[in-house]
Image: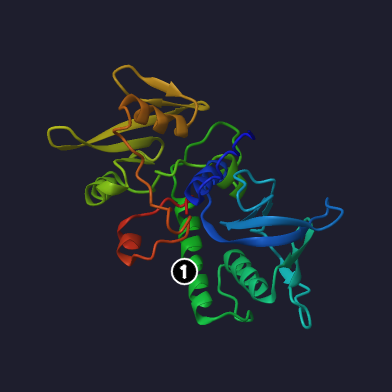
Amino acid sequence: MMAKKPPKPAPRTIFQERLKMTALPLYFEGFLSVKRSEYQEFKHFWTELRGASLFFYTDKKSTIYVDKLNIIDLICITGQNSIGKNYTEFTLVLPKEKVQVKTQNTESGEEWKGFILTVTELSVPLHVSLLPGQVIRLHEVLEREKKRRTEIKQLPNISVKKEKEPTEDDVGVLKPMPACFYAVSRKEATEMLEKNPSLGNMILRPGSDNTNYSITVRQEIDMPRIKHYKVMPTGENYTIELEKPVTLPSLFSVIDYFVEETGGNLRPFTYSTADNCGQELNTEGRREKLKKNPYVA
């Protein structure tokens, strides 16, 4: 009897696994054929536009990207003539390389150009041919990207001697934040947990002193209780200020510690992505009430 093949990851699992590699927000995705300077020919990738970076996967189900292209410094897009073709081919002109791109069809080509120009120029392009609904999506992405960049500048100024200024790569890929991180105050974190208990009961946030982090939790034992725990950077590690301090290698480990020590009673406060796999929720109320993690879609 042949061995059963392992089950394919569900969309939610794929999205969560990709968040472990990069916590940049997902704005658009689809298949692209790409030719970079080091490629001898075009390569076919499932591609995600996250923040101002393109992430390339071997296929739609892969959870680890095989290449990444930072396009935040995009100079222009050239070679957009697709007359008489059933696909669009254009070139991303960057300071250090030119990247050739082919899309599956002309419609997706217009969408890709629209989303790429929106996040790099921080304005919705007027010369792309899109439907009204697609233009609305571009405006939504524009507001999200503007907010993300603003909130990045407002994050705690946690630094190590001789540490370089964080870049798009450092913040979004090399040093991703846990999905339950939100740039909110103690009061706002408390309100989020009290008003949305189904989304989780633990939030990681900047500390009130703007140099450390804090964990805010809401536990229901005899009655709901809110507690706050200080998390201090100590070199390359993080120390939870408890009766017996606990030092861990990353903020992800800090979150795991609270989950494991409470037997799963504490759950990270995160948005549901099961239905839209990382896209913006449609509920306007939540978008206003929940101050979203600038790194996470």
Amino acid type, mark 1: Glu
Q: In front: 263, or 243?
A: 263
Q: Is residue 254 visible?
A: yes
Image quarter of residue 232: top left
Question: In front here: 90 or 52?
Answer: 90
| Relative image position of residue 224 (x, y in whole percent) | 16, 39
84, above or below 87, in the image:
below
Q: Dividing the image into 4 quarters, which one contains the N terminus?
A: top right
**Residue behind mark 1:** 140
SS at mark 1?
Answer: helix
Q: Tell me the quarter of the picture where residue 215 sits.
A: top left
Percent position of residue 160, x then y: 54, 32
Q: Residue furthest right?
A: 40
Tell me if 69 is positioned left or right of 182 in this view. right
Q: Residue furthest top?
A: 244
Tell me which residue sits at (29%, 38%) in the image: 216
Residue in front for this viewpoint, 225 or 123: 225
Number of numbered markers: 1
Q: Is residue 13 left or right of residue 64?
A: left
- Residue 105: where, in percent of width, then height? 69, 73
Q: Residue at x 32, y 62 (%)?
A: 288
Q: Quick check: can you spot residue 94?
A: no
